[in-house]
Image (cartoon, rainbow, N blue to C red):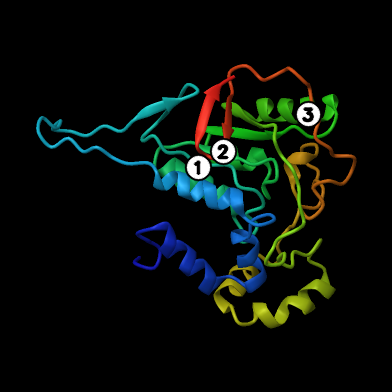
Amino acid sequence: MAEKWFETVAIAQQRAKRRLPKSAYSSLISASEKGITVSDNVEAFGELGFAPHVVGAPAKRDMSTSVMGQDISMPVLISPTGVQAVHPDGEVAVARAAAARGTAMGLSSFASKPIEEVIAANPKLFFQLYWLGDRDAIAARVERARAAGAAGLIVTTDWSFSHGRDWGSPSIPEKMDLKTILKMSPEVITKPRWFLQWAKTMRPPELRVPNQGRRGEPGPRSSRPTASGWAPRRRPGKTSPGFANCGAGRSCSRA
């Protein structure tokens, strides 16, 4: 039981480094270009503080609140994070964990599991939507999220894709065929627990993003997010009412 519990995010990161193959771990912690945005986001959380009230404290603490009409047990929810295929259950496992703690989660457009499977594990789900593709493609993704029962949308309008990283990009294969498996075997064989976890499923990691396609289809490969004509669509002077505009994790304002 002690192995499953961790006290801080730093401990979780240490365990991930020990357990995951080098390329998988690198893909989780790497940032784009110089890494300014990810560093700024982490520093922003460090600026948050607590003002404990000792005198007159309530007999029973209640942290429950609501987000977009969804009642949650605490003012914390899971942020959308793409391609969680480092674990066989991926986003479904995250959804179960969030549900067990009574909170909601955001599901990335680049998730490795279909929204229908994830929402079955946690109905308090917000689907994160990139402003990519033409109007029909965006509308189709919105409709799929609605039909699946998503509680709301998280719209990302400032997305950009960069292959460049100052410390080098992690080696992320396009697909897990026999050639790729043999190439990665030297680093995988040193992580027997991770290997056995996948061996039990009798299938390699699926490196696709099913929520970018139609229901029941595998979706495009996660290593090619700009393929198939994907491109940011700009609408000068227009915003999405009801959503927040946020920058670098520091400030948000209602649109």
* Mark 1 touches mark 2? (CB < 8 Å): yes
Give the side of residue 240 with respect to residue 223, left or right: left
Disc on the earlier residue, 2 or 3: 2
Q: Position of residue 48 (x, y in %)?
A: 37, 41
Q: Residues within 10 Å of mark 2 (few under 14, many from 20)?
A: many
Q: Amino acid at mark 2?
A: Gly
Q: Position of residue 129 (x, y in %)?
A: 69, 33
Instruction: Kindly report the distance in space between the C-alpha atoms of the residues bearing marks 2 and 3.
Output: 18 Å
Quadrant of the image for the C terminus? top right
Q: Nearer the viewer, residue 238 or 150?
A: 238
Find disc 2 in the rendering and name its residue: 106
Instruction: Kindly report the distance in space between the C-alpha atoms of the residues bearing marks 1 and 3.
Output: 23 Å
Query: Against 63, is 220 above or below?
Result: below
Question: Residue, x 18% and y 33% (percent of image)?
Answer: 60
Q: Is residue 140 visible?
A: yes
Q: Nearer the viewer, residue 241 or 253?
A: 253
For this orientation, the residue located farthest to the right is 229
Give the side of residue 191 with respect to residue 2, left or right: right
Query: Against 239, is 131 above or below?
Result: below
Question: The residue tagged with tag 3: helix, strand or loop?
Answer: helix
Question: The residue tagged with tag 2: helix, strand or loop?
Answer: strand
Q: Amino acid at mark 1?
A: Ile
Q: Which mark is residue 78?
A: 1
Disc on the earlier residue, 1 or 2: 1
Question: Residue, x 52% and y 44% (percent of image)?
Answer: 95
Question: Residue, x 64% and y 42% (percent of image)?
Answer: 108
Give the side of residue 75 with respect to residue 183, left or right: left
Q: Nearer the viewer, residue 38 or 170?
A: 38
Q: Which mark is residue 138?
A: 3
Quadrant of the image for the N terminus? bottom left
